[in-house]
Image: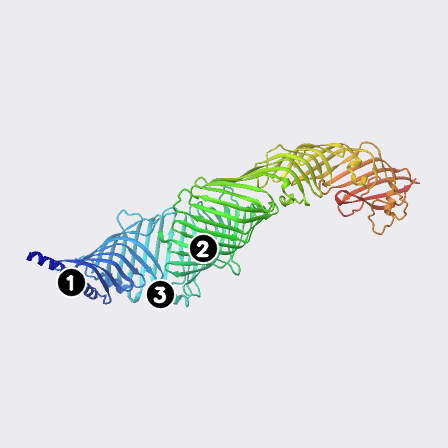
């Protein structure tokens, strides 16, 4: 019992007395080593060991220090030291501090995790190192030797090195050499001189970093003091040469940044598969802690880049916000242009203008491994173009753009965007207004981590009808993304079902739009569905239309297809009426429109500026233009056969056309027309509109033109059908008298121009008026023009026995057009 009590008493005394004694002993030992202000907090102590938190001086501390003493005495000489949670402030790690560390009376040190700090940024570093204090005569005075394995961050390889820390004539020197057989090979030297000066040199060979192509070799040399550093560095990769240049030193203190200008330039020059040159310039700004950043590039190409840049320029400010956070603000306009790597080298350009109240700002925190996180916000105007400048696939931009995004080491966490107006006049033919974009990333949902939703966007333009968009894109960009949603007509029952997918690994995908069967009678005015057709409204319709469109992207090649179907469609408008339209048009290209041969449509009747019936046409679409391949239609009681002609045009063979029906305006004005026409016309399609260019229709036999009310009982001409001259000068009455009882021996009708919407024609007549007191031989020229009168063309061979009298008169034409007839009256024998 006395022995047990004695042992228990000794243990209790050790537990109560040893920690306090150990703390005093350790403070005294550190003060003797040159750290008089060292702070020690002993947590545990035993016979010959202790565990404590140690702060040698500001910026040099360890969260946990485990000290093992030599000998049998509880507080003998320190023999081994294990440190974890070391925090080193590079601004306080100078020459005197290194000297005192070298002279610590310890034989062996084990080091765990380390955090390097420099002002407001920090770098966590997993470091496993062992150092032994060499005191043999052959060793350098106070030298430490050992080895270490460093793990900088995720994606970076581990670095195995040997360590030598010693005092030299120039000052304390730290040398790192690659461990035998280690990859990458790293060597570095740091010498801390007098008065806070230092020199450093680092060489790296065969370094491979995640997401960086090929091995990296680099060399850096720096010298300076706590306030100013001059740095030069070069790096070589299989694809690029990098050089850090700067005529002025890198000023380290914020106070000096406001007084001394400085700057460095990172120059990148392509090598291997890379070409071109880029510059990144960083310079001190007037505000403390603010850097001015400028980036330019010319002819930069790389297989890994989706864009082969022809030019890049922009700039802004970069400012530290403390705690490892940096804020990038692009206050200047930026431009980017080049060619997409889609297999065809499609040109693309993009411009950013923050405007007076806009900006593009990015806040980056951490930047290494799991500590990476950030926030981006943009407000300004964006314009761009995809495709050649003359005929782009997409061209336009947005005003009032506002975008916010947040991300971390796992990827994008949140994204929201809205735009006042997005214009793309080539592809969309209009604008996208009020678009709201939201995106999210769910780490737990590995099969479908991404989701992007566009809701509330309004599309309106010259080609597309007003649409409200509601689409969602979800999936994994590295695997498969899926598109689903709708586009609904604004003010119309139009519904487009949208779907699609994208396979990232195979670089291919497709998107489809399906027009559900649309009942035309439910649309008050069909011109709202066809804003780019140029039709005068309102237009009502009967029947149904449906269709689909599909875009595919495969290994850099964009293709499109689609189909439009019409079933028994009737359309009625002020200048157009179509009865019994039906057919299906298959498309194998969308931009521009293209179809296979032998597309067929039919219509019972088409009434516009001219009226035709029983229309049947075979055609092909090529580059947005109609290539007519054949067809038949009825016109003015006769028949017209259509056939293809050279150069993409067509020919129209006309037979048995009634003169009175071919000129309905004359009949409506009171003229009696007799005769049949036949002939051949040549034309082409201007987009979708047929245009006649050459040819004429001739009367099959002599005929007659009569106007019974030529005199009308009013010598002023009030009884004539149309008076062109406002002063009623009697010339109209003269012309109508000339055609009161006219027998023609030859008649030619030469129509030209867009015959369905704006027809023009010349009428050539040769004959006599049986009621005239003189024998008259006449030549007539009739020009059917919209609202202008042209000088009459004189027919070859016209006789001029006497000075001719001229008369100009007008007849009503279809669709409110005007007509002009010029008549040369030749009086003679």
In the rendered structure, which disc, 1 or 3, sits on the residue that comes first in sequence? 1
Name the residue carrying label 1.
17
Q: Is residue 746 above or below residue 435?
A: above
* Farthest left residue in view: 2
Q: Nearer the viewer, residue 394 or 202?
A: 394
In the rendered structure, which disc, 1 or 2, sits on the residue that comes first in sequence? 1
Residue drawn where x is 23% and y is 61% of the image:
102
* Residue 376 - label: 2
Residue 760 percent across, percent down from the top left: 75, 42
Circle 2/circle 3 CB separation < 8 Å: no
Q: Is residue 345 above or below residue 652?
A: below
The mark closer to the camera, 1 or 2, is: 1
Circle 1/circle 3 CB separation < 8 Å: no
In the rendered structure, which disc, 2 or 3, sits on the residue that comes first in sequence? 3
Q: Quadrant of residue 696?
A: top right
Residue 108 percent across, percent down from the top left: 20, 56
* Farthest front residue in view: 1
Circle 1/circle 2 CB separation < 8 Å: no
Using residue 637 as the reference point, say whether residue 52 is left or right of it: left
Disc 1 crowd, CA 10 A, few/some/many (<14, 14-19, 20+):
few
Q: Nearer the viewer, residue 140 or 593?
A: 593
* Residue 227 - label: 3
- The quadrant in which the C terminus is found is top right
Residue 46 percent across, percent down from the top left: 16, 58
* Residue 155 - label: none
Q: CA distance from mark 1 to mark 3?
A: 47 Å
Q: Secondary structure at mark 3?
A: loop
Q: Nearer the viewer, residue 606 or 169?
A: 606
């Amino acid at each position: 019992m006395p022995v047990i009590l004695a042992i228990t008493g000794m243990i209790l005394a050790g537990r109560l007395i040893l920690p306090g004694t150990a703390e005093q002993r350790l403070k005294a030992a550190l003060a003797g080593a040159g750290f008089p202000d060292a702070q020690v907090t002993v947590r545990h102590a035993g016979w010959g060991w202790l565990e404590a938190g140690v702060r040698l001086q500001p910026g040099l501390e360890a969260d946990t220090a485990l000290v093992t003493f030599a000998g049998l005495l509880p507080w003998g000489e320190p023999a081994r030291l294990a440190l974890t949670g070391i925090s080193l402030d590079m601004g306080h790690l100078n020459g005197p501090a290194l000297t005192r560390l070298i002279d610590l009376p310890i034989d062996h040190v084990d080091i765990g995790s380390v955090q390097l700090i420099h002002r407001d940024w920090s770098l966590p570093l997993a470091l496993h190192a062992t150092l032994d204090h060499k005191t043999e005569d052959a060793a350098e005075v106070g030298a430490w030797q050992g080895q270490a394995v460093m793990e900088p961050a995720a994606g970076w390889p581990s670095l195995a090195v040997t360590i030598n820390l010693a005092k030299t004539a120039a000052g304390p020197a730290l040398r790192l050499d690659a461990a035998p057989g280690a990859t990458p090979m790293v060597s570095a030297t740091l010498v801390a001189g007098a008065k806070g000066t230092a020199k450093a040199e680092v060489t790296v060979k065969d370094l491979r970093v995640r997401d960086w192509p090929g091995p990296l070799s680099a060399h850096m040399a720096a010298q300076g003091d706590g306030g100013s550093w001059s740095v030069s560095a070069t790096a070589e990769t299989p694809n690029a040469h990098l050089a850090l240049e700067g005529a002025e030193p890198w000023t380290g203190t914020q106070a000096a940044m406001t007084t001394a200008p400085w700057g460095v330039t990172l120059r990148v020059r392509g090598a291997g598969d890379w070409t071109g040159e880029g510059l990144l310039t960083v310079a001190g700004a007037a505000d403390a802690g603010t850097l001015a950043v400028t980036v330019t590039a010319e002819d930069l190409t790389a297989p890994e880049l989706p864009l082969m840049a022809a030019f890049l320029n922009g700039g802004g400010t970069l400012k530290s916000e403390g705690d490892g956070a940096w804020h990038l603000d692009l206050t200047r306009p930026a431009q980017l242009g080049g060619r997409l790597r889609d297999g065809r080298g499609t040109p693309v350009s993009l411009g950013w203008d923050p405007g007076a109240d806009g900006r593009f700002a990015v806040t980056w925190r951490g930047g290494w491994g799991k500590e990476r996180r950030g926030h981006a916000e943009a407000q300004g105007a964006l314009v761009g173009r995809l495709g050649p400048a003359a005929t782009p696939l997409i061209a336009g931009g947005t005003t009032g753009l506002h975008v916010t995004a947040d991300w971390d080491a796992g990827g994008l966490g949140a994204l929201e965007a809205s735009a006042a107006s997005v214009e793309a006049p080539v592809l969309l033919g209009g604008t996208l207004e009020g678009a709201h974009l939201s995106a999210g990333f769910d780490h737990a949902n590995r099969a479908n981590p991404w989701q992007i939703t566009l809701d509330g966007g309004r599309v309106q333009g010259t080609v597309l009808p007003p649409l409200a968009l509601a689409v969602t894109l979800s999936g994994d960009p590295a695997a498969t993304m899926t598109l689903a949603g709708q586009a609904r007509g604004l003010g119309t029952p139009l519904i487009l079902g949208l779907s699609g997918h994208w396979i990232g690994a195979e670089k291919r995908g497709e998107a489809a739009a399906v027009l559900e069967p649309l009942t035309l009678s439910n649309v008050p005015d069909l011109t709202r569905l066809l804003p780019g057709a140029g039709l005068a409204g309102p237009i009502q319709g009967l029947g149904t239309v449906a269709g689909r469109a599909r875009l595919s992207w495969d290994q850099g090649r964009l293709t499109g297809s689609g189909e439009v179907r019409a079933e028994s469609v009737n359309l009625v408008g002020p200048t157009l009426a179509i009865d019994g339209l039906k057919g299906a048009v298959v498309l194998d290209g969308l931009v521009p429109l293209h179809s296979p041969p032998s597309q067929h449509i039919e219509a019972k009747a088409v009434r516009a500026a001219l009226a035709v019936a029983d229309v049947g046409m075979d055609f092909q679409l090529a580059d947005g233009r109609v290539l007519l391949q054949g067809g038949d239609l009825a016109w003015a009681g006769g028949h017209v056969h259509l056939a293809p002609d050279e150069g993409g045009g067509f020919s129209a063979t006309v037979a048995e056309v009634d003169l009175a029906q071919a000129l309905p305006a004359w009949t409506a004005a009171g003229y009696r027309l007799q005769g049949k026409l036949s002939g051949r016309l040549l034309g082409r399609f201007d987009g979708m509109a047929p245009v006649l260019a050459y040819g004429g229709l001739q009367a099959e036999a002599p005929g007659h033109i009569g106007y019974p009310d030529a005199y009308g009982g009013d010598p002023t001409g009030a009884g004539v059908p149309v008076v062109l001259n406002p002063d009623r000068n009697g010339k109209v009455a003269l012309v109508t008298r000339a055609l009161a009882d006219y027998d023609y021996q030859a008649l030619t009708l030469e129509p030209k121009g867009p015959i369905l919407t704006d027809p023009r024609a010349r009428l050539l007549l040769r004959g006599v008026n049986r009621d005239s007191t003189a024998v008259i031989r006449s030549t007539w020229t009739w020009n059917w023009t919209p609202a202008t009168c042209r000088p009459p063309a004189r027919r070859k061979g016209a006789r001029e026995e006497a000075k001719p009298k001229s008369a100009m008169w007008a007849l009503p034409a279809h669709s409110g057009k005007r007509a002009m007839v010029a008549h040369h009256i030749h009086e003679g024998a």
